Image (spheres, helix red, strand yellow):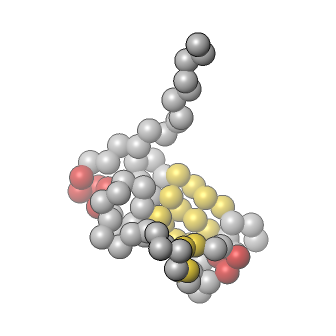
Amino acid sequence: MPIKMLFTPNGPIAVSGDLSELKLTDSTGQPIDVSGEKKIFLCRCGGSTTKPFCDGTHDEIGFRAAEAAVRAADS
């Protein structure tokens, strides 16, 4: 099954699929093993104490995501 990523409204990135194929590393390049998981939730608010995983802090801090990219104005 392919890996799928869903950017949840004002919340984490839900990642599902064959996670044994996902190569996830921390900020130092060390691998993070998620092969036994069926779905993981990655933080995108920056406030999680379990980075890169979501711990629900986005609800506590009132995180509001920019759900669509802002297009640069043509010069």
Can you give x and y, in whole percent of width and height, for residue 72 in the image? 55, 24
Using the image as rendered, state which of residue 51 and residue 59 is in the foreground.
51
Residue furthest to the right in view is 1
Can you give x and y, in whole percent of width and height, for residue 62 in the image? 26, 48
Using the image as rendered, state which of residue 72 and residue 57 is in the foreground.
72
Query: Would you identify the image quadrant in which residue 12 lies?
Result: bottom left
Can you give x and y, in whole percent of width and height, for residue 51 in the image? 39, 69
Q: In this view, does 32 lie above or below 13?
A: below
Residue pictured at 57% horizontal, 55% vertical: 6
Residue furthest to the left in view is 60
Residue pictured at 41% horizontal, 43% vertical: 65
Query: Would you identify the image quadrant in which residue 57 lies?
Result: bottom left
Residue pictured at 30% horizontal, 60% vertical: 47
Q: In which quarter of the image is the N terminus?
A: bottom right
Q: Is residue 51 above or below residue 20?
A: above
Residue furthest to the front in view is 28
Residue pictured at 66% horizontal, 61% vertical: 4
Using the image as rendered, state which of residue 26 and residue 64 is in the foreground.
26
Q: Is residue 10 above or below residue 39?
A: above
Number of labels in the image equals 0
